[in-house]
Image (tube, rainbow, N blue to C red):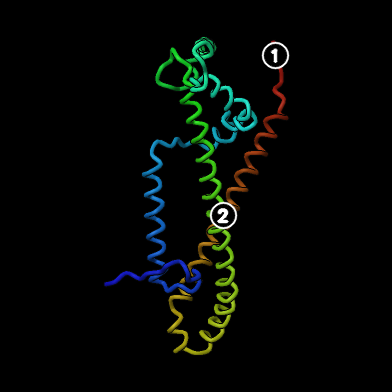
Amino acid sequence: MTKPKDDGSTPVDELTEAEFDQLHVDTVNQIAALRRRWRGLVGLTEKSRAKHPGKNLGPLLPALRPLFTAMLPNSHDDAKTAESRAKFTALFHVHGDTDAGRDPEHFEAALLLRRLHRVAAQQDVADRLEAFSRLLADDVLHTSDWVLIAGQHALDTARSIGDGNAKYGSFLTAVFDALRNMTKAALARGAELRAERAAAKAKDAAAADAATTVTPPKTP
């Protein structure tokens, strides 16, 4: 069976289900391929991300890039300047254990410059992916609204004709079963929430009673 092809010129709302399923599969595979290519990325927890010190790099970039560059050999240096630059660079080796490099005895300026380059490239990719993710999520809401408006009208009509015509009602058995299950689930969840609120209220009341209760002094 030939897979449906789409060259991207067809708006997503005009794709057939088969074409959209193929687009879905292709996109998931592309995301998986990206994850494989971007090997070694480090994830963070929500808590550590919120206050991560890496957020403070931006303001220092204009100073850090030329500083790291100044520590590297320069092809334009004459012999005397090259010797002075090497001595200058050696002054920073005291911080060699802070750059997460391979040699704790040397400050690896070239490594840090490469990481600065990577940070800029990754941030560009992250921004583009975030924008696309937001576009996808926005379109989910937009498309859901189309379905919801038409669907609510259709459900109202289904309830009406299902009650008055047994044959039509037989076409709607799965619909009415789903609606009944939704109602049962909503009632059950409502009962759970009321029980949780009652328990919390009783707990608060018990805590308030405990806080106001005065223990009489012991009689000597």
Residue 133, position as x, y percentages in the image: 53, 54
Q: Viewed as shown, does residue 50 lie left or right of 21?
A: right
Q: Which mark is residue 168?
A: none
Mark 1 against mark 2, which lies toward the viewer? 2
Q: In this rendering, is residue 213 above or below 205?
A: above
Q: Residue at x 48, y 30 (%)?
A: 114
Residue 57, position as x, y percentages in the image: 59, 30
Q: Residue at x 47, y 20 (%)?
A: 108
Residue 122, position as x, y percentages in the image: 50, 40
- Residue 63 picture quarter: top right
**Most foreground residue, 107 or 90:** 90
Tag 2: residue type? Answer: Arg
**Most foreground residue, 213 or 150:** 150
Q: CA distance from mark 1 to mark 2?
A: 71 Å
Q: Viewed as shown, does residue 49 lie left or right of 218?
A: left
Q: In the rendered structure, which disc, 1 or 2, sits on the residue that comes first in sequence? A: 2
Whether residues under marks 1 and 2 lie with C-beta atoms below 8 angstroms apart, the answer is no
Q: Residue at x 70, y 29 (%)?
A: 211
**Most foreground residue, 190 or 16:** 16
Q: Residue at x 37, y 60 (%)?
A: 25
Disc 1 marks which residue? 219
Tag 1: residue type? Answer: Thr
Disc 2 marks which residue? 134
